[in-house]
């Protein structure tokens, strides 16, 4: 670009869009910027503690407690490997039947 090259040619060389070239040119420095992790809406450790303290709570009750929607709680529990209340109860029943 400094030696007279075109923006479209630079975009082809670097295999990026022309908008990216314009963004690069508008920056003070081309050094990479560090991304600061954002604060999550749902604290996973607090969710684990809540599950331990209230194992019989429904997902919608947990959602109200944390101020998030039901699907957020469902996804977080799934990622943590914690099953739904009904499936946990079913597993307990199955274990007791198998153990006699």
Image: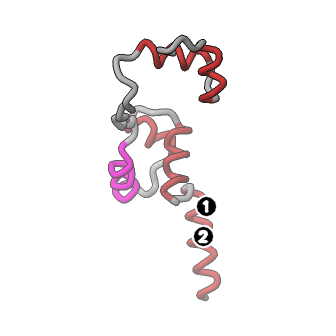
Q: Is any atom of residue 39 visible in this view?
A: no
Which residue is the site of mark 1? 87
Q: Quadrant of residue 36?
A: top left
Residue at point 54%, 56% (across, down): 85
Residue at point 44%, 43% (across, down): 62
The answer to whether 8 is drawn above or below residue 50 in the figure is above
Q: Position of residue 1 (x, y in %)?
A: 51, 15
Category of crowding for the residue at label 2, using alpha-carbon neighbours closer than 10 angstroms: few (below 14), some (14–19), many (at least 20): few
Asked if residue 54 lies left or right of residue 86, the reply is: left
The answer to whether 93 is drawn above or below residue 11 in the figure is below
Q: Secondary structure at mark 1?
A: helix
Q: What secondary structure characterizes most of the magenta part?
A: helix
Asked if residue 49 lies left or right of residue 7, the reply is: left
* Magenta run includes residue 16: no
Which residue is the site of mark 2? 91
Are the residues at dot 1 and dot 2 in contact (C-beta closer than 8 Å)?
A: yes
Residue at point 38%, 55% (across, down): 48
Q: Position of residue 17 (x, y in %)?
A: 62, 20
Q: Position of residue 3 (x, y in %)?
A: 50, 15
What quarter of the picture does the C terminus occupy? bottom right
Q: Find the magenta span and give its range.
A: 43-54
Q: How is the image coloured?
A: secondary structure
């Amino acid at each position: 670009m400094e030696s007279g090259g075109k923006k479209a040619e630079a975009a082809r060389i670097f295999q990026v869009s022309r908008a990216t070239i314009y963004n690069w040119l508008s920056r003070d420095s081309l050094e990479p910027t560090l991304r600061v992790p954002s604060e999550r809406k749902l604290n996973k450790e607090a969710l684990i503690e809540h599950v331990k303290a209230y194992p019989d709570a429904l997902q919608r009750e947990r959602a109200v407690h944390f101020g998030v929607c039901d699907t957020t709680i469902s996804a977080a529990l799934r990622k943590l490997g914690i099953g739904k209340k009904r499936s946990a109860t079913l597993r307990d029943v199955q274990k007791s039947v198998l153990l006699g």
